[in-house]
Image (spheres, rainbow, N blue to C red):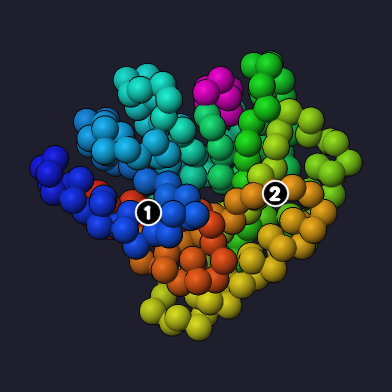
Amino acid sequence: MNKDELISQYLQVKDTVPTDVQLVAVSKNHSSEAINYLYEAGQKVFGENKVQELIEKYEVLPKDIEWHLIGHLQTNKVKYIAPFVHTIQSVDSEKVLKEINKDAAKNDRTIEILLQVKIAAEDSKFGFTVADAQAVFQKYLANDFPHVKINGLMGMATFTEDEDQIKNEFSILKNLFDEFKAESKIEILSMGMSGDYKTAISSGANSVRIGSSIFGERK
Ligand SMILES: *Cc1c(COP(=O)(O)O)cnc(C)c1O
């Protein structure tokens, strides 16, 4: 895709996302050059799923980009992104949460995170069970992770054509979000990708992670 095509695809997608819903442009496997075109067109929030790729792009791109990590994070890699990452959406264990808290403290900052909850029937996806997410959230409320701000929840629905199943899965996360929101000031419900973001938004998502609809298929 050339620059004009990319920007036109981006604007088309952006048009379908209500202004009160955050659009995270998922740039994994796409070049820094392509990201920069979108940056110049006004997009400031980008999502990557690999630490190494995130760091390489962070280093060469404008520093006011808000970087979100959306892929599984290994404990031993937290330190590489702790100085600059804006939000870690894919926090899927208490172990990694503790490490983020520790490295945030070392960097003298508070890192925003989302708890990733497993809502899909497929068993390949990472994430807390609803019960484990509730338990870790109670520890958070008891101030167990003072250098972390849990700002919401992230989830992925099953990759299926079955709309009802997708809606059911999203509603599990929406209910949990409402439950947490009644206890603490959390803001972000991140669900929906290229294939299902419209369903996600009608199910209550206020943040969507869109890759291929903007950038084209990944190589
Ligand atoms: C790749 C990815 C996306 C974007 O997927 P598309 O189908 O390309 O929009 C969203 N969320 C996560 C966690 C991803 O890994």
x then y, percent, for residue 190 = 54, 55
Real-space Cα separation, disc 2 to disc 1, in angstroms: 22 Å
Residue 99 can be seen, yes or no: no
Which mark is in front, 2 or 1?
Answer: 2
Where residue 135 appears, as percent x and y from the top left, is 82, 53
Query: What span is in magenta?
Result: 78-84
* Residue count near mark 2 (Cα–Cα under 10 Å), binned few <14, some 14–19, many ≥20: some
Instruction: Report which quarter residue 213 is drawn in.
Output: bottom left
Task: Give left or right: position of 97 versus 58.
Answer: right
- Which residue is painted at 32% across and 20% down in the image? 60
Q: Amino acid at mark 1?
A: Ile
Q: Is residue 183 magenta?
A: no
Q: Residue at x 79, y 58 (%)?
A: 182
Closer to the camera in the image, 2 or 49: 2
For disc 2, the marked residue is: 186
- Upstream in sequence: badge 2 or badge 1: 2
